[in-house]
Amino acid sequence: MTPPNATEKDADLRRLVGYGIKRANSSMMGAVEQILGRFGFRRTTFSALSVIAANPGLRQAELADLLAIGRPNLVQILDELQRPGLIERVRDPEDRRAYMLRATPDGDTRVAQASAALMAYDQRLTWGLSAPERATLIAALRRVEENAAEAWEDKDAEHLSTS
Amino acid sequence: MTPPNATEKDADLRRLVGYGIKRANSSMMGAVEQILGRFGFRRTTFSALSVIAANPGLRQAELADLLAIGRPNLVQILDELQRPGLIERVRDPEDRRAYMLRATPDGDTRVAQASAALMAYDQRLTWGLSAPERATLIAALRRVEENAAEAWEDKDAEHLSTS
DNA sequence: CTGCAATCGTTATAGCATATAACCATTTAC
DNA sequence: GTAAATGGTTATATGCTATAACGATTGCAG
């Protein structure tokens, strides 16, 4: 593990978990786009198809919630998957407002291939961490996300207070 | 710690450390903008001023490297700090190409206040983690960032190979 | 000493992800 | 029967990041 170095020029920022997350996130963007680009994906289209492939019949509103993105922003993402025939939007006969989303066989194949490539890269990101340490990292990130969501809902709390 | 749940609809994505990082990052954006906004900062201007305040005399190219952002993108960030008098750009007499960056007293005060508020929120992000666990998380994120940088430089490696 | 490469900072531009407002069609609840 | 809620969409804006090109200045090799 790489311990923080208090003499670094950005030591004040490095004490923030949030900054570590932002830097780790930024550092992988280029590579992730490159890997996914080989399969015709962007990060958002890959994530969407990954969830759709695992959950046939999912609705757009459900998918937006799962991915934590706005429903208006999902429209073009799904257009970009539907156009090359990777997903279908099928009207729910029981609720004509909604679509049931489905990956096509080609979509299933394509996302499985991209997933394998991305997982290999993801393993590379954690060289030097044991499997339990990797699992702990994933769980800790999940905790941060949950805490952020709770904090957002508790707007009256001091750290987000506007008073 | 929140362990992964294999029956979740996005379980395939949740196995990726990268996805956990992206979600944790996204989840705090709104709150961070709101907190920093109270002090007249955005995320990028806050980070820049934080590093400048700790390192008087820093050059723009050095700052860009430290923050891992492009030098062209730094120009407007520094403009936005210089305009309200939070920093100064002073020509290096020994190299008239370069500026030496300095926080003004107002800049030092403003960034210290914002730092305190952001640290409080950052502590909230890690409720449920002990201090050693928080330190381990920061170190693990650093490792991920370093691995990503190494992988980017080793483009011939399989996981980023274009062959 | 000269010429060229490198460095520093800048301008211009483009793309992606995200946020917000408003709208229409349909369903649900009272 | 009516109004509120839901599902999806269109339109628009903002911030962050990436890239190309440029001018001024410095450093290095011959």
Image (tube, coloured by chain):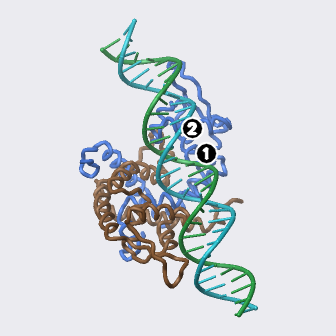
Chain colours: A blue, B brown, C green, D cyan
Quadrant in which residue A110 is drawn? top right
Q: Which mark is residue A53?
A: 2
Name the image quarter holding the C terminus of chain B.
bottom right
Q: Is residue A2 above or below residue B43?
A: below
Q: Which mark is residue A39?
A: none
Name the amino acid, label 1: Ala
Q: Identify which residue is drawn at 31% across, 45% down.
A: A150
- Whether A87 is drawn above or below A125: the answer is above
Q: Which residue is mark 1?
A: A112
Query: Disc 2 marks which amino acid?
Result: Ala
Tags 2 and 1 in contact by the CB under 8 Å rule? yes
Residue B17 image point, x, y percent: 47, 55
Q: Is residue C22 left or right of residue B156?
A: left
Chain name for mark 2 = A
- Indicate the quadrant where residue B160 lies: bottom right
User: Within the image, what quadrant is residue A18 found in?
Assistant: bottom left
Task: Say which residue appears at 47% left-offset and 41% top-offset.
Answer: A69
